[in-house]
Image: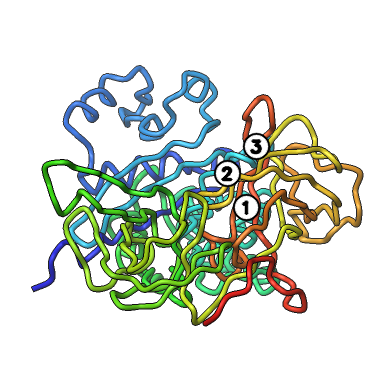
Amino acid sequence: MTTPATHPVDILRFNTCGSVDDGKSTLIGRLLYDSKSLMEDQIEALERSSDITGGGQVNLANLTDGLRAEREQGITIDVAYRYFATPQRKFIIADTPGHVQYTRNMVTGASTANLSIILVDARLGVIEQSRRHTCLASLLRIPHLVVAVNKMDLMGWKQERFIEIRDEFETFLPRLDIKDVKFLPISALNGDNVVTASPHTPWFSGPTLLGHLESVHIGSDWNLNGFRLPVQWVNRPNSPTDPQLHDFRGLSGQIAGGIVRVGQKVLVLPSGLTATVKQIWTYNGPLQEAFCPQSVTLVLDQDIDVSRGDMIVGLDVLPGGSSNVSAKVCWMHSRPLQRGKKYFLKHTTHTVQAVVTHIINRIDISTLEPEAEPAELALNDVGEIRIKTARPLIYDAYSINRLTGSFIMIEQGTNATVAAGMLMPPDETVKPEYNDFAI
């Protein structure tokens, strides 16, 4: 019998994006409402709301648009997270804004997503913001994409209009690195093809949106090639009453890649020391093996020097290690990025001082065309930069491992998060900057 300790909960993280008034918040409200995921007091609050329309319909967007400014303007400004579950799967939803000036918020909500829903207004078709968010989803390496053609009821549920929008999308999708794309005709306001199939689309044989979310395969989204455990905490209970815990020394963190087994030989970076895994512990008890993205505590057979910020890796696939790295960044602050300024760079559990040595290009999100060597990156700009860090980063390319290939930049003095970054592949001609070791 499978125990809870060996069977991690299947959780799908997804975000909604698209242009203003495409119906992102309404779609999430409809998912929660029709899947019976709301408490009675939430439903009563919606029904008592002053935002009831003249037709007597509650404003489902208010389930996610919690800021007063959002309700007054009928737009999404901040990222709103909602949680619900069905018998098949648990879900974490990020409702992200559609305005161009809130691109940074969209990147924040999409950074951990397995799937992204791009909403398109059937009346307007594919517009610049539709392309922008699709390109961002590609840059963020989101594995699965759903293009939900919304407000089909306002177009008389014409199959020709749905096909026209699908064909236009497919003209630029080959330029992007998104392999799994699904097109759905829906009406978020009325619930057609959201949770239940619509009688208005006999020409559409695909699943409902919820049906697709429940069945999309995400098991292969995690990188299981090459064990990675960024050490978050050295666990020393030192319990005087429990002899088993008196000398206990475990290394705790969330597995960021691969599989680890009891008896496996591992390498601690950047020190280059090796050891064998003696025990694997979780909250529910010991395991013989664990894999990404489980949170575990490893006990090694040797008392070697390991501290927060170090990374424990397998010997089969080694990561890169360098204090000179290239990365794509989305700039998230009103003060522009300039060469030569020092920042803190937080990568996995490791925080280090860093300086931007070169701005290689700025990417036009609408066309993916680069502008070479701009003077700066402004708010919401995406570009490629070179970074020099005070200590080497132990990392994988973001295209291989989103957890060990991502980072944030923090402004010194204010502690404001100014950028989200995606590391480029390490230079294979340069020897990694960690100590020599014997394998």
Q: Secondary structure at mark 1?
A: helix
Query: Going by the image, does 404 lie left or right of 9?
Result: right
Write down the residue under mark 2: 106
Instruction: Classify 10 Å Cα crowding around label 2: few (below 14), some (14-19), many (20 and above).
Output: many
In terms of depth relative to the viewer, which is nearer, 169 or 399? 399
Query: Going by the image, does 177 lie left or right of 365?
Result: left
Q: Secondary structure at mark 3?
A: strand
Give the foreground label among 1 and 3: 3
Q: Residue type at mark 2: give it.
A: Met
Write down the residue under mark 1: 133
Q: Residue at x 12, y 47 (%)?
A: 242
Q: Earlier in the sequence, mark 1 or mark 2?
A: 2
Q: Is residue 198 visible?
A: no
In terms of depth relative to the viewer, which is nearer, 178 or 415? 415
Marks 1/3: CA–CA distance = 24 Å
Location of residue 399 with respect to 383 vertically, above or below: below
Q: Is residue 29 visible?
A: yes
Write down the residue under mark 3: 410
Position of residue 62 measured from the top left corner of the image (x, y, whole percent): 39, 29
Q: Residue type at mark 1: give it.
A: His
Location of residue 63 with respect to 103 vertically, above or below: above
Position of residue 46 measured from the top left corner of the image (x, y, whole percent): 29, 26
Task: Tell me the quarter of the image containing the N terminus.
Answer: bottom left
Query: Going by the image, does 432 lie left or right of 208?
Result: right
Q: Earlier in the sequence, mark 1 or mark 3?
A: 1
Position of residue 258 measured from the top left corner of the image (x, y, whole percent): 42, 72
Q: Residue at x 63, y 40 (%)?
A: 104
Position of residue 44 measured from the top left corner of the image (x, y, whole percent): 21, 25
Query: Going by the image, does 308 lie left or right of 385?
Result: left
Q: Secondary structure at mark 2?
A: helix
